[in-house]
Image: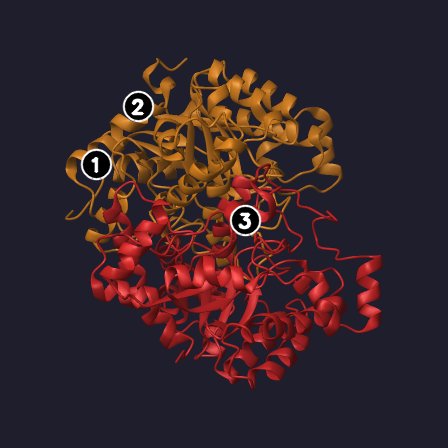
Chain colours: A red, B orange
């Protein structure tokens, strides 16, 4: 009730344009069927997805709520959260007056990180067809991402090239927890294809690469899984810089989605500091690590770091660059950030405009 | 001597004596292991966390002809006490005893290492103190080693590595923490890995600089683990010192962790206050390296984000090459805070420093 009143007030007070850079459509396995061969459909019925954590139907870190989703996000039509376009439109897009949402499909139906790479290849292609058929055809404000079977770099590049001709696709999409660090050579064909297509590469937190979540082994709790996405992302950014992919593809743009951003300046400081001593090991770097971060990396806001002193958050945002931060809600998940209240109130109007829509509009070439 | 950012009488909480190879430990090994070292050709346990010739491992001018630095207490004293004017220094020996898989071998090497440190270092300079290196491969052995060494009051801390086989909060480690508390010893977690897991959550990286950078992630995970498992709820007196952690990752880590704690605290109900409050009460961090730009204003801001004057401890990290010249204390720290970091905070952290040695 309260939210509704606030929404109305807000709509009257300002016409701030909002682009949501992390909107999760739920693609069900059933929805994949028309885009799969009989062989793969039958395979899925018999053996199912086999992700690198062992659970056939759940997770070793059970979510805090079913489907990790807001309790009010279950549509009256009966499907899972994020599966009903009309309900999502009403509850999210129209409610907040969102101009565009970038689709970020997760879940085993997209084939991400399956032990069977051939199945991943088939499901990634199906997920791309599914975004068009079930989502963008019905709601043009939503823009699809190119799901790739990332553990096979060459097949991923082929999928990027196949989809890039369709301007609806706004980024290449992969996950943060994969079998090797993102700078490693096996993934280079993905970056090459993305650079060639002029598309950013969006990397969303999560995935199952088969390694413990920490470099000290498996932690026990879901709260640690959520917290550790940031440490994994630190290793990911470190790898991309140190392997030289930004020297190889100078136009490459990376978007960190739901990885947090507060850690990024301190990571840049650490890499710069120790690079000064160790630069003879990585002569292929032509500038300080933090300069690659500044030039090549964008971040999305959710889960917005919550500081004790609000000025500290602003300071961190300034260190990253207000032109690199893009709003995201993570709808329909439980840790959803409300577009109306999650950004620090002391941002200037211009900064709000950039973060809510301007930066994403430029990066994704929307309009 | 302009810009010498040291403090007279400071307590240097992180210096590293170097064990060049296993020959140094032979006199301190039991006969069976002494024979094994010789007959099996177990020459060295040097860890890839600090390759001898890596620039980070030592400043060039401190190295001997063999490439090793800090192999003798006199070398260390000349720099840490004479040049930088510290009054006390705590030896944290980084020799790869944590790497071996055989629990009995790990125990033997830890005991030999601690005895070697007592005889060859502590006995030779009364200003030195040390950490007890323990075999975390086996919790009973680890507790035994604490009990054995704690009789010597010059041991002021228990030392473990940032990257273990499993996270440090896990309950089967708790007897180690109980033993440390019994003897008024903080647990020092130092950069380094037992290499039971890849040093990143994305597998084994290509370059050494990635390995070193990943230490900061190990520290974050250990803070999260110790808090979420309830180690401080169970052991309110437990104190943890993060050694050579880089420091500046801490605020943003706590913002994220704190946000998820608000949302997910039902999963870990024994965590009954915000993580940053727990960290301020139970954790301390040594000041080198301080991962920040050289600009004193940036240093000031980064330290302000910690929101605590009690949390930092003076350390040179000798002989690791973390800074140039004599700027042990990074520029940008106020004189009053420098005094706290150099003396007051270490004294408040290491209970045994206030007791008479022996």
Chain to which the residue tagged by mark 3 belongs:
A
Q: Which mark is residue B338?
A: 1
Q: Position of residue A135 (x, y in %)?
A: 56, 70
User: Are there few (<14), some (14-19), or many (20+) residues within 10 Å of tag 2?
Assistant: some
State the SS at label 1. Answer: helix
User: Are there few (<14), some (14-19), or many (20+) residues within 10 Å of tag 1?
Assistant: many
Residue B343 appears in the rendering: yes
Pick the front one: A92 or A187 = A92
Q: Is residue B216 above or below residue B341?
A: below
Pick the front one: A346 or A2 = A2
Pick the front one: B287 or A44 = A44
Does residue B37 appear to the left or right of B72 in the view shown?
A: right
- The residue that disc 2 covers is B347
Q: Position of residue B146 (x, y in %)?
A: 54, 20
Pick the front one: A22 or B172 = A22
State the SS at label 2. Answer: helix
> What is the C-alpha distance between the residues marked 2 and 1?
14 Å
Does residue A158 appear to the left or right of A262 in the view shown?
A: right
x 38%, y 45%: residue: A1
Name the front one of labels 3 and 1. 3
State the SS at label 3. Answer: loop
Q: Position of residue B355 (x, y in %)?
A: 35, 14
Chain to which the residue tagged by mark 2 belongs:
B
Does residue A74 appear to the left or right of A40 in the view shown?
A: left
- The residue that disc 3 covers is A69
Please tell me which of labels 2 and 1 falls first in the chain.
1
């Amino acid at each position: 009730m309260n939210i509704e009143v606030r929404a109305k007030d807000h709509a009257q007070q300002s016409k701030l344009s909002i682009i949501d850079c992390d909107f999760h459509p739920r693609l069900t396995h059933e929805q994949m069927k028309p885009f799969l061969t009989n062989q793969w459909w039958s395979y899925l019925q018999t053996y199912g997805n086999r992700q690198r954590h062992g659970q056939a139907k759940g997770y070793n870190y059970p979510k805090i709520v079913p489907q990790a989703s807001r309790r009010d996000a279950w549509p009256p039509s009966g499907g899972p959260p994020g599966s009903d376009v009309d309900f999502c439109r009403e509850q999210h897009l129209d409610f907040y007056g969102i101009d565009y949402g970038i689709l970020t499909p997760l879940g085993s139906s997209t084939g991400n990180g399956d032990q069977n790479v051939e199945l991943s290849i088939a499901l990634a292609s199906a997920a791309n067809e599914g975004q068009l058929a079930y989502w963008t055809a019905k709601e043009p404000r939503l823009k699809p991402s190119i799901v790739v079977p990332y553990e096979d770099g060459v097949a991923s590049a082929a999928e990027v090239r196949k989809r890039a001709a369709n301007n609806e696709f706004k980024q290449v999409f992969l996950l943060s927890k994969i079998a090797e660090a993102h700078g490693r050579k096996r993934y280079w064909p993905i970056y090459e294809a993305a650079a060639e297509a002029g598309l950013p590469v969006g990397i969303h937190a999560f995935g199952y690469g088969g390694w413990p979540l920490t470099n000290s082994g498996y932690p026990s709790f879901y709260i640690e899984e959520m917290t550790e996405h940031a440490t994994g992302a630190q290793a990911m950014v470190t790898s991309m810089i140190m392997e030289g992919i930004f020297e190889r593809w100078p136009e490459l743009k990376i978007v960190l989605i739901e990885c947090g951003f507060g850690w990024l300046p301190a990571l840049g400081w650490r890499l710069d500091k120790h690079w000064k001593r160790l630069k003879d090991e990585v002569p292929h770097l032509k500038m300080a690590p933090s300069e690659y971060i500044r030039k090549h990396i964008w971040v999305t806001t959710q889960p917005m770091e919550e500081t004790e002193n609000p000025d500290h958050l602003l300071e961190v945002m300034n260190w990253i660059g207000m032109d690199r931060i893009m709003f995201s809600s993570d709808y329909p998940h439980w840790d959803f950030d409300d577009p109306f209240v999650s950004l620090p109130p002391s941002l200037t109007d211009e900064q709000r405009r950039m973060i809510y829509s301007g930066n994403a509009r430029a990066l994704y070439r929307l309009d | 001597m302009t810009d010498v950012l040291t403090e007279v009488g400071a307590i240097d909480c992180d210096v590293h004596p170097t064990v060049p190879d296993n020959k140094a430990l032979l006199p301190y090994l039991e006969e069976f292991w002494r024979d094994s070292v010789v007959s099996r050709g177990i020459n060295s346990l040097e860890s890839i966390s600090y390759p001898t010739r890596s620039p980070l491992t030592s400043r060039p001018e401190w190295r001997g002809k063999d490439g090793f630095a800090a192999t003798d207490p006199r070398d260390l004293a000349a720099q840490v006490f004479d040049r930088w004017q510290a009054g006390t220094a705590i030896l944290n020996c980084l020799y790869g005893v944590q790497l071996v898989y055989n629990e009995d071998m790990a125990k033997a090497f830890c005991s030999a290492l601690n005895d070697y440190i007592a005889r060859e270092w502590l006995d030779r300079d009364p200003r030195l103190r040390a950490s007890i290196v323990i075999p975390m491969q086996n919790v009973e052995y680890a507790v035994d080693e604490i009990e054995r060494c704690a009789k010597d009051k010059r041991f002021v801390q228990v030392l473990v590595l940032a990257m273990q086989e499993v996270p440090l909060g896990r309950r089967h480690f708790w007897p180690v923490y109980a033993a440390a508390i019994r003897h008024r010893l903080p647990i020092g977690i130092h950069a380094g890995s037992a290499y039971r897991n890849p040093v990143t959550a994305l597998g084994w990286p290509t370059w050494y600089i990635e390995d070193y950078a990943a230490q900061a992630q190990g520290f974050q995970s250990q803070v999260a683990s110790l808090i979420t498992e309830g180690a401080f709820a169970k052991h309110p007196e437990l104190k943890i010192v993060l050694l050579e952690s880089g420091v500046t990752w801490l605020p943003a880590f706590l913002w994220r962790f704190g946000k998820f704690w608000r949302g997910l605290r039902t999963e870990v109900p024994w965590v009954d206050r915000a993580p940053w409050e727990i960290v301020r009460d139970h954790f301390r961090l040594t000041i080198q390296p301080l991962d920040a730009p050289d600009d004193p204003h940036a240093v000031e801001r980064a330290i302000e984000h910690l929101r605590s004057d009690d949390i930092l401890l003076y350390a040179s990290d000798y002989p690791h090459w973390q800074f140039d010249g004599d700027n042990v204390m990074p520029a940008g720290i106020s004189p009053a805070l420098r005094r706290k970091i150099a003396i007051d905070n270490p004294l408040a952290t290491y209970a045994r420093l206030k007791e008479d040695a022996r």
